[in-house]
Image (cartoon, grey):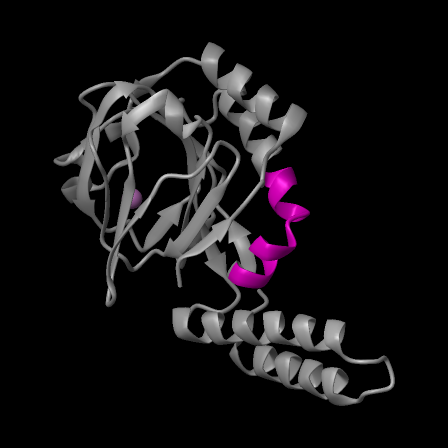
Amino acid sequence: MLLSIPSVLEGESLRTAQRLAASAPWIDGRITAGHQSAQVKDNLQIPEGSPEARELGQIVLAALERNGLFISGVLPLRVYPPLFNRYDPGMTFGAHVDNAIRQVTGTPHRIRTDVSCTLFLAEPEDYDGGELVVEDAYGEHRVKLPAGHMVAYPATSLHRVMPVTRGSRLASFFWVQSMVRDDAQRALLFDLDMAINGVRADLDAEHRGPVQLTAVYHNLLRRWADAS
Ligand code: NI
C-alpha cells in the first residue's frame, strides 16, 4: 500500500525544519548506502547524529506521534531516527531496495524496515525532476508532494529518485518497523479502520455495528501484531 499523508509538517514546524536544513552541513549520501545502493546513489545528506539532524529528527518524530493517518496506516513499532537528503541539479538515486535490517547508528538497536517514508520538505515548484518512483504489482507510481506531505510505502518495493534538473529537492526519509510486518495485513487493517470511521459517522450512536466491527479490528490486530 502506498499511502500519502498530507500536512505532517505545516506552519511554524515546517518553516523551522526548512530553516534548520538550510544551515545544516551536507555530506555525500553514500555514507548510509549498502553496497548495491552506493553504486546508484548520488545525493547529499546531513550527517547522522549531528545537532542539526537531531533537532530536525525531533521535529519529524513529534509530528508523527500526533498523526492519526500515519499511526493507522503504518502501525509503527519503531521508527528509525529520520535522515535528511538533498538532490541538487544532476543528482539522482537509481533503482534499489532498502536494506531489510538497519542498525541505529551508535546503538545496539536494530530495526526491520517494513515501511519506507519520504517527507517532502521543498515545494514542488522550487525544483524540476526529483520524483520518487515506486514500483509495485500495479506498475510505477511517481510521487512528488507539497512540502510537509509524506508518502509511506512498503520497504519491499524497488524505488528510485529521478534526476533533479533545476533547484534542490529536500526531504526527510526514514524507515519504520511496523507492529504488522505483512503489507497486505496492514492494508486490510487500515481499510477496516477507515470503514469503521465512516460507518460510525453515518450511524446513530445506538447501533451496535461500529462496536462489533471495532472488536473485529482489535482481534485481527491481536492475531497479527508484534508489540515488542
Ligand atoms: Ni531507498
* Residue at the image point whose x is 63% and y is 80% from the top: 217
Q: Is residue 198 depicted above or below 9 in this figure?
A: below
Magenta-colored segment: predominant secondary structure: helix
Q: Is residue 108 visible?
A: no
Where is residue 24? Give x, y as percent. Answer: 46, 14
Q: Is residue 9 depicted above or below 65 in this figure?
A: above
State the image quarter where residue 59 is shown: top right
* Residue at the image point whose x is 65% and y is 39% from the top: 62
Where is residue 156? Give x, y as percent. Answer: 29, 60
* Residue at the image point whose x is 48% and y is 20% from the top: 50
Task: Name the side, left or right, on which 95 lies relative to 119.
Answer: left
Task: Name the side, left or right, on which 138 lies relative to 228.
Answer: left
* Residue at the image point whose x is 65% and y is 47% from the top: 65
Q: Is residue 68 visible?
A: yes
Nearer to the camera, 160 or 198: 198
Query: Which quadrant is the C terminus positioned in?
Result: bottom right
Where is residue 55? Give x, y as percent. Answer: 58, 24
Q: Is residue 132 magenta?
A: no
Q: Is residue 195 depicted above or below 66 in this figure?
A: below
Q: Quadrant of ligand 1?
A: top left
Q: Is residue 188 depicted above or below 127 in this figure?
A: below
The span shown in magenta is 61-73
Task: Name the side, left or right, on which 54 lies relative to 183.
Answer: right
Where is residue 2? Give x, y as percent. Answer: 39, 58
